[in-house]
Image (cartoon, rainbow, N blue to C red):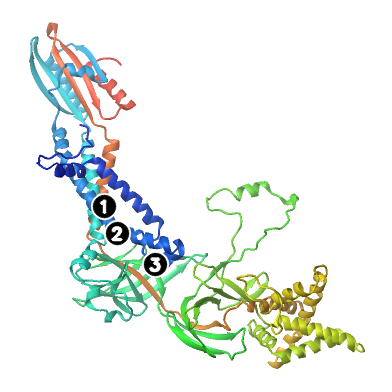
Amino acid sequence: MTVSTQGLHIRTGSPIVSGTVELLSSMRFAISLLSVICIASVIGTVVKQHEPFINYVNQFGPFWADVFASAHLFSVYSAWWFLLILAFLVISTSLCIARNTPKILADFKAYKENIREQSLKAFPHRAEGELGETPEAAANRIGQTLLGSGWKVKLQSRVTPTGTGWMVAAKTGTANKIGYIAAHSAIVLVCIGGLLDGDLMVRAQTWFLGKSPFMGGGLIADVPAQHRLSANNPTFRGNLLVTEGTTAGTAILAQPQGVLLQDLPFGVELKKFIVEYYDTGMPKLFASEIVIHDNETGESKEARVEVNHPASHRGINIYQSSFDDGGSRVKLQAVPLNRPTAPFEVEGTIGSTTALSNGDDKLTLEYTGLRVINVENFAGSSAGAATDVRKVDLRSSIESRLGSGHKTVTEKTLRNVGPSITYKLRDAAGQAVEYHNYMLPVEIDGARVYLLGLRETPSEPFRYLRIPVDDKDGMDGFVGLRAALGDPALREQAVRRYAKAAVEDGRPELAEALAASATRALGLFAGAEAVNAPVANGAPAVRGGLQAVSAFLESNVPKAERERASDVLVRILNGTLFELMQLSRERAGLPPLAQSEATQQFMSQAVISLSDTFFYPAPMTFQLKDFTHVQASVFQVARAPGQNIVYLGCLLLILGVFAMLYVRERRLWVWLSPSRDHHAQARMALSTNRKTMEADREFDLLKTQLLKVQP
């Protein structure tokens, strides 16, 4: 039997109804729907689903973000058009099954023993022969042989002009037709399961039961009833965040416009959250030890939830989704950088804010994140290094590129650099800059430095200011030097000391000239002296640092003399900054720095860092002094009645596909007509749904067994 691509034809007086039923039940319509679903699934895989809208604006731009949002491409699997396509696919496939199943079942039972003798001559696999036995005896022998080989056989006697003839009709592999029903039924079951476990039930409650998404803020307990779904909701999938030591019983269902709250018939208490890391800093294992408190019976049940190992209660599965900060307590030390302010400490919890006052400026400190573990790659870079041809090992070079597909030539040196804090400083106009500061110093290029990161927008990577550590492995030395740089009296005193130390006694005119040059260089570097240099459109004005010195040279020194003048000016600047450092230590009651390689390394990095502080947008930075880490577990809770239906559909799909691909349906006919001397004249034909070499070999074997004909 050949399955038709035409639809179901019904007898009705309306051609529109008849045409609609024919279209819906046709195979071409079902295949078109499947194609659209595949394309939509590709979009849902490529585009991240249910992200905040601002993320899509950053990725696609305002115009295309609005266009894609209007087409529900950011929530494809819950879009009305996707659910509508699934519903039409269920209807179309069901009609296809209803149209073809009776024919398949009828063909499944039929042996087609009434086929005419002349029709056997049209089959590709046919053979003839004369048997030394009567037709009835030959029919019984052939039937028993086929039954022994697993064939189903039916014998039919026919009266002919020459006597009584016998038709042997046999078939095997008819399970191939069951594969068609199983595969198409699987599509229906999977779609029905998807509709049950999708957003359809939740949307129906918003359409017909007066439920609406909640778009405000505040405590969950204060959210009105019209934004809550009953604990008897037949299907849902939401997120549940539980902090260590607390209990939560209300899940959050994200909607295109706001959220819906799903009350659970139980509460989940997080006793302990466990997380283990790889050497790369990626989580290797995160699990939650929980206690489930039943609201109806008061029963408490302990459970452990891991990734791919959910817990279940009252038909609701609890999956380990991710983890988050549960409101860690942090203590930050304010360190002045650009303005002379007194250090102070602030305390807060992650997710909260603290109001700050900077004179007339009002700032808001937002605690956004705490990371206890930060694993970074500290492998040395050999880029640009010369290669000694005598040391080239061709074998090692080739083997380093063989093996695993992710192998790289560059080896990684991973190291945990300790905790870090992320915060935002927001001004009165609502503009915010995000900062990321490490708690401990990090060794980079042989020098220990504090890393202070910042970025203006979330799409940008962090840019880091490196603060060199002092002899006590802190940043007090640098902070003191930065404060001294902003003090005119100390700058003047540092210039006098430098001029006195650099010029021999008895040459006051040279000392005075050197002091003037040092005053000019230090004033430019400190931003105390204005630089008359043109500023390009969009470029920030030069305020101080090495960029101010460079701008001064470009504006006042001929190009041919700039290199020599810059060397002299930088040498003078380094000398005066060293004296300024000594003065800052004297003011702090510390002994002067000794002339050593460590001191020279500190001063070299300090000059660069001082220059970079003029680009730091905040007057101070906040260093993490202490913290109390509180973790939270994010669970996905789901009641999925369609899950078992989908599993059954997947099983039927596997069985159906294997039946259609690997089970060959064969039908065999042997017509035995009487001939002279009571012998039988045999004519045999074989029909198969696929022409293969195996079918040729099988037919040759049947000729030998049944007709005694050698191939």
Q: Spatial distance from mark 2 to mark 1, Cα to Cα?
A: 10 Å
Disc sitting over residue 206 in the figure? none
Q: Is residue 277 left or right of residue 552?
A: left
Q: Quadrant of the N terminus?
A: top left
**Residue nearest the observer in this picture, 45 or 33:** 33
Residue drawn at the location 27% of the way across and 58% of the way down: 80
Q: Is residue 127 left or right of residue 103?
A: right
Quickly name the residue at label 1.
85
Residue drawn at the location 35% of the way across and 53% of the way down: 41
Among the two numbered marks 2 and 1 on one chain, the one whose residue lies closer to the N terminus? 2
Considering the numbered disc 2 on the image, is that residue within a helix, a strand or a loop? loop
* Amino acid carrying mark 1 in the image: Ile
Q: Is residue 216 left or right of residue 446?
A: left
* Amino acid carrying mark 3 in the image: Phe
Among the two numbered marks 3 and 1 on one chain, the one whose residue lies closer to the N terminus? 3
Query: Can residue 577 be seen in this snapshot?
Result: no
Query: Label 2 crowding class (10 Å Cα cut-off): few <14, some 14-19, many 20+?
Result: some
Quickly name the residue at label 3.
53
Query: Can residue 327 be seen in this snapshot?
Result: yes
Please determine whether, in this image, residue 353 is positioned above or below residue 586.
above
* Amino acid carrying mark 2 in the image: Ala
Considering the numbered disc 3 on the image, is that residue within a helix, a strand or a loop? helix
Query: Label 1 crowding class (10 Å Cα cut-off): few <14, some 14-19, many 20+?
Result: some
Considering the numbered disc 1 on the image, is that residue within a helix, a strand or a loop? helix
Residue drawn at the location 67% of the way across and 69% of the way down: 445
The picture places residue 157, in percent across and down from the top left corner, at: 9, 19
Furthest-top residue in this view: 676
**Residue nearest the observer in this picture, 467 or 644:** 467
Q: Spatial distance from mark 3 to mark 1, Cα to Cα?
A: 25 Å
Quickly name the residue at label 2.
79
